[in-house]
Image (cartoon, rainbow, N blue to C red):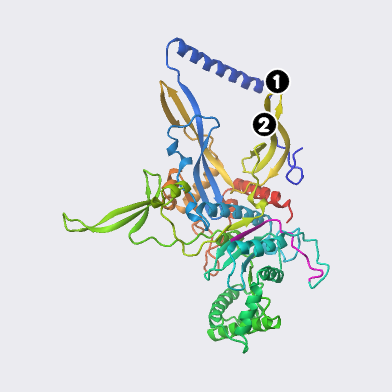
């Protein structure tokens, strides 16, 4: 009997049925092939002919990865176990140069891709298995309801990034993930939940423009905004940040209310944007503060956009209301948290990833510098030039004066730092860890003794274990033991193998030749879908976008097929903005079979993470 990770019965996996006659025919064919091969080798030796050996050394899989806003195709080179080394290995697809050593303290390209994939798979599984727009906000440890919050320090940062993560962020996450059934038994919080039973979460640290560290957190349970703010401020006060904030505010307002004109200008722009959107939808956004909600209601009732004078007055009233609340509690409840309402978005996944996987902004190169791909080095390099006078013709000419690795290994940086181009970024670096998450979100990574299998939809299962035993001669023997089939989550995009090619190496008379076979076992449903998407976008557009990624991507026969929704027949929104269409909808409209597999894959991920808790 096969079970998933939580002990639920899985449908029986049916192996293809072969009759006794078919099995015997297959066995006889294999025996005959072995005899023919041995006879050919014996004939070659007896007739002094050179023996030719043929070995499959690798498989090249052409894969299609189904992302939120398009498809990415690449060739993946998989070397056969115990295969001889390809003498041309330095040029193969697994040996493209590139590393992350230049990004210490920043989110590197490789880490950003990893985070984006992990978060995308997680949030897509929630969106496809939960009707978020119909979900009500309620504290319920059985209900999956993503919460996205930004946490800031109430006052000027006086401690190291690591101190704040250890003494402020860590206790806050411990509170989030605490058992949601436990209640405070005494004190001002009597009867309130000690935690909210968050099982899957992610956090990202980054600097603000004022250089203070702040955090984005995504949690899988609904948590009321006031409880988040109260708890975060308590954690901040462990290092005195709330007290310092209160002292600053008391001095600022010692003579009464003072208008912050800079904040007023920001609030005016925010309210103007909210007003326009509310007129289009006829709805007041959730979680809007009382002052703004009052003015938006007037705007909807009179069907008019709020003018500048009214907007400015609303912004003043908002500050005054905030001031009165802050004064009442002695300025000890600073606005250090921001909850982003995401359940009503057309794409929760796209919105959240924009924040948590944001790449660091690099300072521009000098006017006399440029990045190019160097074919000989198989990597990107930075060239530096100078304008010099050519004494022969009296003309100023651009001359290369330096070349540095744009991507390099830690060893290269250590042994030859002058040859490595040091990237500089606009924002300061974060000391220590930049991000973290629940272990469950990292997905399943099998131990060496675990045997897994992955089906055609990409779903992964544990199917057995390798056990080392001692035989009668006292020797270690490796034995494989089948186990109940257990479903496990591997956090990767839904991916199809379009076809594959075999890499064959032949050796004869000391000469080695390597060649690649034609495409084998094409997936016709996937190929038809890809062709349809390319026809929508245009082959020239796909090739142009793919070339822009760079030579390394081109060597992997990489292709990017982006969604161009209007070309695909999806109309704009009534406000003129582009429609937001999930990949599941595109599949449903263009390939029902792939849609079925896509939905089953993300149901597998969701069920492994939550055991159908939603």
By secondary structure, the bulk of the magenta-drawn segment is best described as: loop
- In front here: 473 or 517? 473
- In front here: 503 or 338? 338
Classify 75 as above or below 140.
above
Q: Is 191 a magenta residue?
A: yes
Farthest residue in the top direction?
46
Expressed as whole percent of the image width and height from the top left, the position of residue 189 reads 78, 71
- In front here: 370 or 275? 370
Quadrant in which residue 203 is drawn: bottom right
Expressed as whole percent of the image width and height from the top left, the position of residue 303 reads 59, 80
Residue at (70, 35) in percent of width and height: 464
Mark 2 surroundings: few (<14), some (14-19) or many (≥20) residues within 10 A: few
Residue at (48, 50) in percent of width and height: 560
Point out the image quarter for the N terminus.
top right
Residues at marks 2 and 1, CA–CA distance in whole angstroms: 39 Å
Classify 486 as above or below 100.
above
Residue at (39, 50) in percent of width and height: 419
Quadrant in which residue 68 is drawn: bottom right
What residue did someone put label 2 on? 16
Farthest residue in the bottom direction?
255
- In front here: 389 or 497? 389
Point out the image quarter for the C terminus.
bottom right
Specify whether 101 is left or right of 26: left
Callout 1: helix, strand or loop? loop
Specify whether 311 is left or right of 294: left
Disc 2 vs disc 1: which is toward the camera?
Answer: 1
| Magenta residue span | 189-204
Callout 2: helix, strand or loop? loop
Q: Is residue 301 visible?
A: no
What residue did someone put label 1 on? 473
Q: Is residue 243 visible?
A: yes
């Amino acid at each position: 009997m096969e079970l998933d990770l939580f002990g639920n019965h899985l449908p029986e996996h049916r192996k293809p049925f072969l009759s006794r006659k078919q099995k015997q025919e297959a066995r006889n064919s294999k025996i005959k092939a072995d005899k023919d091969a041995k006879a050919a080798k014996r004939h070659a030796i007896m007739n002094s002919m050179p023996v030719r050996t043929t070995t499959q050394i690798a498989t090249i899989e052409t894969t299609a990865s189904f992302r939120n806003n398009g498809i990415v195709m690449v060739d993946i080179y998989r070397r056969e176990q115990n295969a001889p080394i390809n003498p041309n290995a330095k040029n193969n697809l697994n040996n493209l140069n590139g590393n992350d050593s230049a990004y210490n303290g920043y989110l590197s390209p490789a880490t950003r891709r990893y985070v984006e994939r992990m978060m995308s798979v997680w949030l897509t599984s929630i969106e496809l298995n939960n009707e978020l727009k119909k979900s009500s906000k309620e504290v319920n440890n059985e209900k999956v309801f993503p919460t996205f919050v930004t946490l800031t320090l109430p006052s000027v940062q006086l401690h190291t990034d690591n101190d704040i993560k250890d003494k402020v962020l860590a206790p806050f996450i411990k509170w989030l993930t605490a058992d949601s059934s436990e209640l405070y038994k005494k004190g001002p919080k009597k009867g309130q939940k000690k935690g909210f039973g968050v099982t899957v979460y992610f956090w990202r640290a980054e600097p603000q423009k004022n250089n203070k560290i702040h955090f984005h957190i995504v949690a899988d349970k609904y948590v009321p905004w006031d409880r988040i703010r109260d708890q975060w401020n308590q954690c901040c006060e462990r290092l005195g940040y709330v007290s310092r904030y209160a002292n600053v505010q008391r001095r600022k307002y010692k003579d009464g209310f003072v208008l912050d004109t800079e904040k007023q200008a920001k609030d005016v722009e925010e309210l103007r944007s909210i007003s326009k959107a509310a007129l289009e939808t006829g709805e007041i956004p959730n979680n809007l503060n009382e002052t703004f909600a009052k003015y938006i209601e007037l705007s909807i009732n009179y069907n008019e956009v709020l003018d500048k004078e009214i907007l400015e007055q609303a912004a003043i009233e908002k500050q005054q209301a905030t001031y009165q609340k802050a004064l009442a509690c002695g300025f000890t409840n600073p606005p250090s948290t921001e909850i982003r309402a995401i359940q009503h978005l057309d794409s929760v996944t796209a919105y959240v990833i924009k924040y948590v996987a944001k790449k660091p902004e690099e300072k521009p190169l000098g006017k006399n510098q440029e990045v190019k791909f160097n074919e000989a080095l198989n990597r990107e390099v930075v060239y530096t030039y100078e304008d010099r006078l050519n004494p022969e013709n009296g003309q100023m000419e651009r001359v290369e004066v330096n070349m540095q690795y744009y991507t390099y290994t830690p060893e290269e940086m250590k042994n030859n730092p002058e040859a490595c181009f040091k990237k500089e970024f606009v924002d300061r670096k974060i000391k220590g860890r930049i991000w973290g998450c629940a272990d469950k979100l990292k997905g399943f990574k099998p131990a060496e003794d675990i045997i897994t299998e992955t089906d055609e939809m990409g779903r992964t299962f544990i199917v057995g274990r390798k056990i080392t035993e001692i035989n009668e001669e006292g020797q270690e023997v490796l034995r494989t033991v089948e186990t109940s089939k257990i479903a496990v989550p591997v956090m990767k995009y839904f991916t199809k193998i379009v076809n594959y090619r075999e890499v064959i190496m032949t050796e004869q008379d000391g000469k080695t030749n390597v060649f690649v076979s034609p495409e084998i076992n094409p997936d016709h449903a996937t190929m038809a879908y890809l062709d349809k998407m390319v026809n929508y976008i245009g082959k020239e557009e796909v090739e142009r976008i793919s070339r822009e990624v760079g030579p390394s991507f081109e060597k992997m026969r990489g292709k990017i097929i982006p969604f161009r929704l209007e070309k695909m027949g999806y109309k704009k929104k009534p406000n003129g903005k582009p429609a937001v269409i999930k990949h599941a909808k595109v599949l449903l409209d263009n390939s029902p079979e792939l849609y079925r597999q896509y939905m089953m894959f993300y149901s597998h991920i969701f069920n492994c993470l939550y055991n159908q808790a939603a």
